[in-house]
Amino acid sequence: MATDRGLLQQKLEAMTKAAAAKTHLRRLGRLFNETVLIDVDGDEFYLTFEKGDVIEIKPGPSLKTPWRFALRVNGDALMKFWEAVPRPGYHDIFGLVKYGHGRIDGDILALVKNLRFFKEFMALGRIEAGA
Amino acid sequence: MTSSIEPILGRYVGLNIGGAHQRLYFEEAGAGHPVLLLHTAGADTRQWRFVLNDEAFTAHWRFIAFDMPWHGKSLPPEGFATTEYLLTTEAYIETVLAFCNALGLERPLLVGCSMGGRIALQLAALHPDRFCGFIAIEASDFQPAWYDTDWFDRPDAHGGEMGAALVSANIAPHAPQTERWNTLWMFMQSGPGVFRGDLTFYTRDDSLVSRLSMIDTQKTPVHMLCGEYDLTCTPADAMRTTCAMKGATIAIMEELGHFPMSENPKAFRPYFADALARMLG
């Protein structure tokens, strides 16, 4: 079942707002100035980070927007990832990849260097879900 | 806040391993038959802090845990500054046996987690006479890396922070926040290249696969424990490994991940109590 595009946009906007309110997260991301592609069932969202803040969420598709790395994920799996207490395998972005629900493309080292920051950002959807 | 002194005692022992002098740190608590506890890659004895502080366990067993060379409070050997640390199965086995000899441990029960569990199974195959039984936690025959081990030893990034962020994938969401972060702190503190050197051994040496059939669980019991949230050693990996050892038993642990004794001691406790009871026959 395809995940609603508008709902995803709202979710990412809510995560952006939640991230801006987290002092430790902004400190963790202070050197993170990249554009990341989040691809959910083919629906693209280009998130541009500057010093740990999301300064733009640009909906795709776009062939002209460069990105550093991409998280491509199955929508149902992403919803399970965002459950308040996710089930085994859905509890981490690497779990989604390991069990074939998603893929990470691009400059993976750029992700790994900022891994805690990016994983905590992605998990903010979970906090939102539990709110 | 009330102050308290824990019953854990820490000491150092000098050993000769691979022709090099090694000063190893170890902790112990309890009285009874010895149980040797082996930590995971990139961490140290602190992973066992709750077991060593558990009065119900220490009333019946003498628990001993040591920091592997290069880990925790065990210094690396002389010349480390110009040495690439790469752990091997042979060096790991030699270290465990040398430690047992130095402390005069008579057929201890061997308990290991992750790479410690892997080496426990290697010892079950190659030196079963030296131990009375084996509890292998988050242990499997072999897994290739699903990550690049070189990520964790780079001059332009903090290997400890990256390693901690990676292994956090293996911790269950049920872990109390305090113990989740205490568990990750050990990885953050790990010396440069140490986690990589451990992972190189763990992800490239597949020699255990052909040795599992050598294990005689009638003489030395083997019990496996695996957390359902472990992404590194998945329940499927642990089940496959268990099935290759005739007579071995396994428990899949709910709401636990790759560092069960450290990330969530309360949830781990009943599984470990059952494992110890099985070793009594």
Image (spheres, coloured by chain):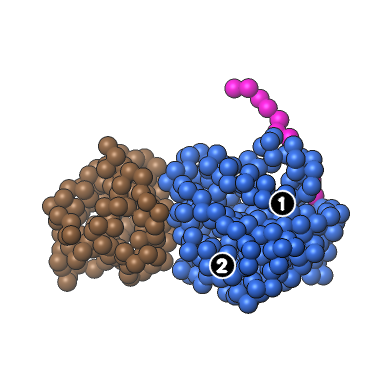
Chain colours: A brown, B blue
Image position of B146 (left or right of B221): left
Give the percent coordinates (x, y) of residue A7: 16, 50
What kind of element bears circle 1?
loop
Up/down of B220 relative to A26, above or below: below
Residue at label 2?
Answer: B243
Which residues, given as a range, are shown in magenta? B1-12
Residue B198: x %, y % from top left:
61, 65
Residue A63: horizontal and vertical position, in percent?
17, 71
- Looking at this view, is B187 or B214 the one in front? B214
| Above/below status of B67 relative to B145 | above
Question: Is B122 a magenta residue?
Answer: no
- Residue B281: numbered disc: 1
- Residue at 62% x, 62% y: name it: B248
At label 1, the amino acid type is Gly
Residue A112 left/right relative to B137: left
Report the residue at 36% width, 55% height from top: A90
In the rendering, which numbered label is found on residue B43?
none
Taking the view exactly as shown, the residue that stands out farthest to the top is B2
Check disc 2 and report its element: helix, strand or loop: helix
Task: Confirm whether the magenta stretch covers residue B3.
Answer: yes
Label 2 sits on what residue type?
Cys
Give the CA distance from mark 1 to mark 2: 20 Å
Frontmost residue, A82 versus B239? B239
**Left/right of residue B12 with respect to residue A45 in the rendered view:** right
Crowdedness of circle 2 by 10 Å Cα count: few (<14), some, many (20+)? some
Magenta region's main secondary structure?
loop
Whether residue B188 is visible: no
Q: Nearer the viewer, mark 1 or mark 2?
A: 1
- Which residue is depicted at the point 39% across and 65% down? A98
Q: Nearer the viewer, residue B172 or B280?
A: B280
Query: Left or right of B106: which side holds B239?
Result: left
